[in-house]
Amino acid sequence: MRAMNAVVGLALAVAVARSGAGQTAAPAAGDPAVLKKSCDKGAVADCYTLASMHRRGEGAPKDASKAAGFLKKACEGGLGRACIDLAGMNRAGEGVSRDLNKAVLLLKKACDLREGEGCLQIGLMQQEGRDVPKDLGEAAAYLQRACDAGMSGGCGALAPMYLDGVRYPRDAAKAGGLLKKACDGGHGDSCVALGKLMIAGDGMAKDARGAVALYTQACNRGDARSCHELAAATERGDGMPRDAARALSLYTKGCDGGDPRSCHAQGRLVRDGAGTARDPARAATLFRKACEGGAPAGCTDLGVLTETGRGVPADVALSAALYQKACSARDARGCLQLGLLYRGVTGMVKDPFRAANLFKESCDQGDLLGCSTLATAYLRADGVGRDVDRAMALFKKTCDSGFAADCYNLGSQYQRPFGRTPDLVHAVPLYQKACAGGAAAGCYELALLHEVGNGVAKDHTKALAFLNQACTSGIQDACAKLKVLKGR
């Protein structure tokens, strides 16, 4: 595109030079009659100009059919841009009969005429299976041609094929090179993707500061998604000191730029009073903007405020509708929160079966709290048949991911199994992990085991220490037991 602009600039300079040398001034470029004569003589640029005038209805009567005819002349004369515009009219049925096959041929012709946008459009269509059969092989070839022609979107669209191992063997380094080329060309989404590779050290050395520099560069260009990533890095302290106030400012910039996830994150900080005064009403406004903009997490958090009456009037029915909207958009927390309502919240019909299905949906989408809640439902036969094996498998998953309470829950299933032999060999390390992670119930069980030497060495000192830990965390039975043991 820069090359094309340079050519146009050079042509204008030559025209001015000729005019200044005493040449007869060229007729006004906007005169349709003059343009038509010139077009009929083979001046494809004038055919294109005349087509644009008829298509927009500016300087000539609006007439899509005439526009298509002049574009056809320009395309046949070798003007790739005209082929692209005519392809768009054929796809939309504007001024011509809708003809997707003809549109594809026109885009391919534009690509062959070294018009990178034609290569990009046909590549994306084939990559996504949009209006044409999906063909990743051809898509890759056209996207590569688009990338080589300087279309940053082509490089950016080709990169995931290497990153995900689609069509090509996985090659994160190659993907990173393509993303860098796209990012340098102004493709904001590629800056975001490249930054994530740099933070993860995937295909390149870990470089959180380098990622921050990319996000900053793209955010300064006005890319709202990059502002969101920069804000998130600032909030976490990745590649820079943590700064909630600066993160809030960047989320605000992203939100104002049209990124709904930034609106949600901005609302979250405002709700929690991070980097600003706590303001649930303002947070609700931001969550609503995020929800309406297509960020389902905004619907979920607005639902939580609506359910509890924070910043907005309490309305359980409305919160259920918001959770449902979020869940339908595959927000796992939305499914979980809706399931919790169906467990019998005031104003909702209790429906354990539907609740369990929602917990499963949440868990399947990766929400560990949904998995934990589903595991409990399997143990209690609450909306699902009792299934201890499934419950234990889910508890293991959540325990391994840091849910200390579920380490205790899993340990208790080994110690007090349903119809099985107790297994303290597995239970004890789970209680230890639970206790170390802050689940006081695990500390209490360890104290009882050490008191009598069941599954562990009998140790009065350790029993007292674990009881004290459990008592401090609020387990009253531990406090009572501690008094008894200290009195011995």
Image: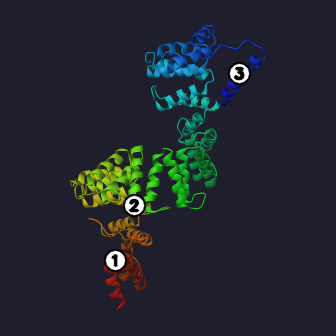
Front label number (2 vs 1): 1
In this figure, what is the number of numbered marks?
A: 3
Measured from the top left, where is residue 23 in percent x and y?
Answer: 75, 13
| Quadrant of the frame with the N terminus | top right
Q: Is residue 65 above or below residue 171?
A: above
Measuring 58% from the left and 18% from the top, which residue is drawn there?
A: 49
Q: Which residue is mark 3?
A: 11
- State the image coordinates of residue 379 (x, y, percent, origin top left): 28, 61
Residue 144 sits above or below residue 257 on the image: above
Under circle 1, the secondary element is: loop
In the rendered image, which quarter is residue 53 located in? top right
Looking at the rendered image, the disc whose residue lies closer to the viewer, 1 or 3, is: 3
Q: Amino acid at mark 2?
A: Lys
**Amino acid on which the number 3 mark rests in the picture:** Ala
Report the front residue among 466 and 122: 122
Taking 32 as reference, is 330 left or right?
Answer: left
The residue that mark 2 highlights is 396
Find disc 1 in the rendering and name its residue: 475
Q: Say whether marks 1 and 3 touch (CB < 8 Å).
A: no
Label 2 crowd bin: few (<14), some (14–19), many (20+), radius 10 Å = many
**Labels 3 and 2: the sequence-earlier one:** 3
Kindly report the distance in space between the C-alpha atoms of the residues bearing marks 2 and 1: 24 Å
Residue 149 position by quadrant: top right
Q: Residue furthest left?
A: 349
Q: CA distance from mark 1 to mark 3?
A: 84 Å
**Three-letter amino acid code at disc 1?**
Ile
Q: In the picture shown, does residue 55 fall above or below 347?
A: above
Q: Is residue 193 visible?
A: yes
